[in-house]
């Protein structure tokens, strides 16, 4: 029974799009467009610097010291140095060097201006020296933080909701082409943020504008410098046949296996994380040494390069698919095992993103299973990527899009199989994941 007095008018529902009709929202759109240019250029420079440092430390430096190529043991001392730099950054600079990657992809808020140097240094030490994490999380944090800090130089009393829109626009611009498409990067941020309804629309429109402008800047700088766009691409994708009953059976198998492996990777990282944090500097150095030893073990056992275990795997996906005939099923299983162990250790203490390593582990696992009857290569590759992504990220729509759009037109052919594998992996990973001890606080809407 209503407590409203008889005859009193009903309260009119609030207009969720009132902000969109204001002049201030038009100002936010203009601000997103303006900020998209320098932030996307900054993101391009960051990725170019990471690439140059990787070549310098793992190719040029060994040659300068007289080695004929890069020794298999070379990653061990470099990753120990990486652990030292990351730990000192976390301990002595404001903030904690960015979000903890074992918790997944965090888009809850932009770092403050004082925290930005720590995010940058920890990310460079992680990515340039070979830890198994990707650049997407640092770019999201740096893009959002720089955008908010730049606007606050002009307007110190920036409202909280406006700061959230500005920060998200900066993040959209920073990852505009990293995943192969500005729309895919925008979708990743949308699903990870957990926003919905009118709030999502208000944040999404400036973000899409910034992402579109950022994509143009990436393409222009890539052409002008000759460095490319640092975008996720595949070459030589094998033809995908139409799904059949055997394919759907394999989708169930891949989804189940990926859910179990993904939860194992994440549980191990969450188990190590508090133990590393108790003795941050020595423990992170030891973690770096462990990652280097996994790379060394793989190189010695397989006869292939230790670099296949290092880094995020973004640039290794296309060579893995192109050279699949050179890998035995056992070699691919060894690759999955060593990469997963190095990935789990990196998640526990280094600073970077979890997306690309999960894609590489899933792709290698799918190719290993494709040696069995009834499982075509393209379907196995795509299902492995999608199922492992959702097990680590818990973002099912993003996982489906990542796995299918990456394969181009053939991705549409295998999409039904990818959806089944992703759903199975998602359900399995949620059931196996540790239950929270308390209900999390509701995320405030920007």
Image (spheres, rainbow, N blue to C red):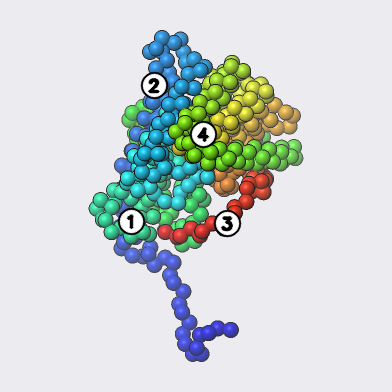
Residue farthest front in this picture: 279
Q: Position of residue 380 (x, y in %)?
A: 65, 34
Q: Label 1 near label 4: C-beta < 8 Å?
A: no
Secondary structure type for disc 4: helix
Q: Position of residue 59 (x, y in %)?
A: 43, 18
For marks 4 and 2, give the CA distance. Answer: 21 Å
- Which residue shows up at 62% across the image and 48% down it? 434
Q: Earlier in the sequence, mark 1 or mark 3?
A: 1
| Front-lying residue, 419 or 305 | 305
Return the residue at label 3: 438
- Distance of mark 1 from mark 3, alpha carbons? 37 Å
Q: Is residue 145 above or below residue 25?
A: above
The residue tagged 1 is: 28
Q: Nearer the viewer, mark 3 or mark 4?
A: 3
Q: Is residue 150 left or right of residue 64?
A: left
Q: Secondary structure at mark 2?
A: helix
Q: Viewer-nearest of labels 1 and 2?
A: 2
The residue indicated by pointer 2 is 56
């Amino acid at each position: 029974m209503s407590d409203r007095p008889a005859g009193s008018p009903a309260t009119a529902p609030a207009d969720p799009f009132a902000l969109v009709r204001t002049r201030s929202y038009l100002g936010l759109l203009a601000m997103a467009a303006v900020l998209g240019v320098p932030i996307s250029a900054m993101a391009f420079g960051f990725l170019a610097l990471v690439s140059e440092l990787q070549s310098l430390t793992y190719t040029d430096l060994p040659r300068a010291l007289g080695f004929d190529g890069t020794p298999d043991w070379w990653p061990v001392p470099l990753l120990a140095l990486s652990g030292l730099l990351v730990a000192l950054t976390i301990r002595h600079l404001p903030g904690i060097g960015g979000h903890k990657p074992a918790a997944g992809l965090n888009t809850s808020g932009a770092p403050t201006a004082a925290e930005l140097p720590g995010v940058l240094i920890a990310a460079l030490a992680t990515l340039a020296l070979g830890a198994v994490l990707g650049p997407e999380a640092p770019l999201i944090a740096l893009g959002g933080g720089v955008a908010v800090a730049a606007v606050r130089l002009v307007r110190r009393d920036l409202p909280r909701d406006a700061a959230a829109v500005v920060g998200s626009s900066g993040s959209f611009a920073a990852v505009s082409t990293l995943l192969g498409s500005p729309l895919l990067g925008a979708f990743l941020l949308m699903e990870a943020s957990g926003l919905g309804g009118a709030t999502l629309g208000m944040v999404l429109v400036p973000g899409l504008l910034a992402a579109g402008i950022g994509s143009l800047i990436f393409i222009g700088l890539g052409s002008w410098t000759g460095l490319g766009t640092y975008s996720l691409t595949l070459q030589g994708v094998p033809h995908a046949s139409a799904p059949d009953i055997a394919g759907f059976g394999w989708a169930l198998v891949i989804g189940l296996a990926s859910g179990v492996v993904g939860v194992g990777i994440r549980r191990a990282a969450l188990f190590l994380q508090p133990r590393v944090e108790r003795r941050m500097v020595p423990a992170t150095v030891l973690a770096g040494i462990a990652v280097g030893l996994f790379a060394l073990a793989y190189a010695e056992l397989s006869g292939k390069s230790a670099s296949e275990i290092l880094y995020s795997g973004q640039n290794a996906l296309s060579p893995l698919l192109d050279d699949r005939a050179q890998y035995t099923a056992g070699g691919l299983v060894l690759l999955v095992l060593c990469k997963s162990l190095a990935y789990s250790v990196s998640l526990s203490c280094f600073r970077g993103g979890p997306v690309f390593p999960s894609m590489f582990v899933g792709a290698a696992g799918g190719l290993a299973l494709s040696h069995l009857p009834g499982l075509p290569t393209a379907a196995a590759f795509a299902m492995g990527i999608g199922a492992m992504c959702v097990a680590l990220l818990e973002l099912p729509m993003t996982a489906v899009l990542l796995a299918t759009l990456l394969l181009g037109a053939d991705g549409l052919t295998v999409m039904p199989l990818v959806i089944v594998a992703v759903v199975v992996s998602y359900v399995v990973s949620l059931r196996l994941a540790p239950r929270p001890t308390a209900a999390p606080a509701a995320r405030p809407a920007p």
